[in-house]
Image (cartoon, grey):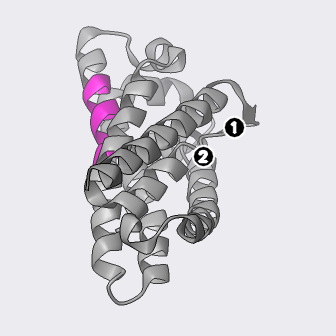
């Protein structure tokens, strides 16, 4: 039992390290309007492998890393109210997404592991982006209005300009890479450790 906990702790620590690297790369590397945010892959992987609480923990760690990012401070913290909202947003959006994705995977995997893994891979980016979009309309309305001049309205800017390509990138990379990684990981770790 103690050996199992130690292995699990090591796996989560490795996922945290990967998440840090992915988040660091995402802060400084982009393709046009797309920031290369690959950090949802370790969250989704953790949600599938370690369940809802594993996904939530990795999501929370991601939130702390995003919160400490220079981009977050420069763009999303112009005043105290927005700063408090940003802290709450950063700490909850991926935590909730990781927990829900892990829970749905756990429920669906009883019938089909592949369906459970794909569901988590789809749901986590959707929840993450949906929570951010809802919060952005409240917290960052001024920013959206200032930057939406080329779009019909702030909603068009939010979904087509600000979030659109990034969401598509996150969704596709998570759907493609997470199930592959889970499949490869399953070959090296006894099945009982994956549940």
Residue visible at 55% across and 51% down? 167
Residue most extreme to the top: 79
Q: Quadrant of residue 84?
A: top left
Is 63 left, or right, of 183 in this rendering? left
Q: For mark 2, what is the residue? A: 166
Classify the position of the C terminus by image quarter. bottom left
The answer to whether 52 is drawn above or below residue 19 in the figure is: below
- Could you tell me what secondary structure mostly forms the magenta stretch? helix
Q: 43 and 79: which one is in front? A: 43
Residue 151, percent from left and from top: 58, 41
Q: Quadrant of residue 10?
A: top left
Residue 137, percent from left and from top: 34, 37
Q: 64 and 155: which one is in front? A: 64
**Mark seen at residue 33:** 1
Crowd tier of the residue under label 1, counting other residues whose Cα lies within 10 Å: few below 14, some 14–19, many 20 or above: few
> Does the stretch in magenta take in 94?
yes
> What secondary structure is found at the residue carrying circle 2?
helix
> What secondary structure is found at the residue carrying circle 1?
loop
Residue most extreme to the bottom: 111
Residue visible at 35% across and 62% down? 101
> Does the stretch in magenta take in 136?
no
Residue visible at 39% across and 44% down? 133
Is 138 left, or right, of 25 in this rendering? left
Q: 42 and 30: which one is in front? A: 42
């Amino acid at each position: 039992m103690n050996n199992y906990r130690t292995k699990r702790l090591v796996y989560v620590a490795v996922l945290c390290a990967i998440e840090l690297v992915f988040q660091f790369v995402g802060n400084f590397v982009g393709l046009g309007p797309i920031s290369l945010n690959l950090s949802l892959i370790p969250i989704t992987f953790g949600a599938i492998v370690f369940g809802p609480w594993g996904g939530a923990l990795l999501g929370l760690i991601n939130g702390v890393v995003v919160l400490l990012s220079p981009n977050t401070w420069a763009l999303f913290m112009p005043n105290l109210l927005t700063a408090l909202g940003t802290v709450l947003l950063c700490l909850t959006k991926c935590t909730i997404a990781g927990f829900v994705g892990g829970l749905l995977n756990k429920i669906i995997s009883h019938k089909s592991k592949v369906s459970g893994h794909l569901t988590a891979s789809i749901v986590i980016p959707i929840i993450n982006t949906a929570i951010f979009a809802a919060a952005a309309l409240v917290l960052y309305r001024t920013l959206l209005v200032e930057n939406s001049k080329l779009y019909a309205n702030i909603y068009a800017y939010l979904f087509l300009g600000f979030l659109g390509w990034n969401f598509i990138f996150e969704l596709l990379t998570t759907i493609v890479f997470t199930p592959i990684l889970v499949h490869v990981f399953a070959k090296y770790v006894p099945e009982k450790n994956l549940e």
